[in-house]
Amino acid sequence: MPHDAAPPLTANQRRIVAMTAAARRRRRLQAMLPWLIIIGTFVIWEILCRAFSVPTFILPTPSDIFLSMVKWWEPLLDNSWQTLMTTLIGFFLAVIFGLALGVAIGSSTLLYHGLYPLLIGFNSVPKVAVVPILVIWFGIGTVPAIITAFMISFFPIVVNVATGIATVEPELRDVLRALGAKPRDIIMKVGLPRAMPYFFASLKVAITVAFVGSIIAETVAANKGIGHLMMLASSRFDVPLVFSGLIVTGIMGVLMYAVAVKIESRTTGWAMRGQEQQVTLPGG
């Protein structure tokens, strides 16, 4: 055998190489899978609509929707920017007030039991029923959409942050008190870090439902936005344009969800290590 030939791999080394290759293939599949499912869904949609001759005013094909998006790209872009702006403003207000109230409720048993019924009742009210009241108070326009986005995304943030802080182990609290920690120190140094995974989980829910709040308000009372554009399109029976608005809203929701996931992985990656190991190692 030549002197410069590499020595044969041991059984353990071959196993490690095989596991690394399998993990690499798994990551590539995970990156491709969402696109494959989306493309497959649109292909099946197109085939079924054409096979059964479904009228466009009932269910347009993806190709009809794409042509409508190309035709009306300027109104779609303008109105989607309006919807994105109102959604983000309402969402950021929900993050600020939801985080503050969640910390307060999770830190105090009295507030927890006193405010929880009110929060549940507030969340149970259909937001579409509140929009006419907001119109009376603030008029038709952007403000009702911002408030609706705030109201619909506020509750999950409060609940998750309060749960994360309230579930700190009593034994850990007792140990910290014995070491001289004040209640504020326990919240800031233990409660908040403990609540961060809950907080970012709530953000991923809140940012998507915030779009629902904006669209609801824009369909009821607005002079601009994707919801307003969809109502105008439905009044003209332009169903492809209605679906174009739905797809644009879905794209914005996915993008904002991806931003929340990216921030979560950068700030609370320590909480996701177990899942990452399960994804990386085959058979784990």
Image (cartoon, rainbow, N blue to C red):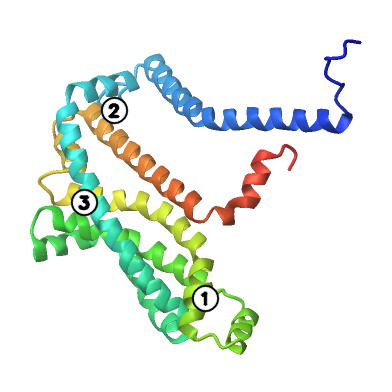
Looking at the picture, does residue 25 appear above or below residue 283?
A: above
Gap in angstroms between the C-alphas marked 2 and 3: 30 Å
Q: Amino acid at mark 1?
A: Ala
**Tag 2 secondary structure:** loop
Q: On the image, which quarter does residue 23 sit in?
A: top right
Question: In x, y percent, where is residue 235?
Answer: 14, 35
- Determine which residue is flagged by label 2: 58
Discs 2, 3 touching: Cβ within 8 Å: no
- Determine which residue is flagged by label 1: 166
- Residue nearest the observer in this picture, 62 or 250: 250
Q: Which mark is residue 219?
A: none
Question: Which residue does the image show at 71% across and 31% down from the upper left?
Answer: 20
Q: Earlier in the sequence, mark 2 or mark 3?
A: 2
The answer to whether any part of residue 209 appears in the image is yes
- Determine which residue is flagged by label 3: 86
Q: Amino acid at mark 3?
A: Thr
Q: Quadrant of the C terminus?
A: top right
Discs 2, 1 touching: Cβ within 8 Å: no
Gap in angstroms between the C-alphas marked 3 and 1: 32 Å
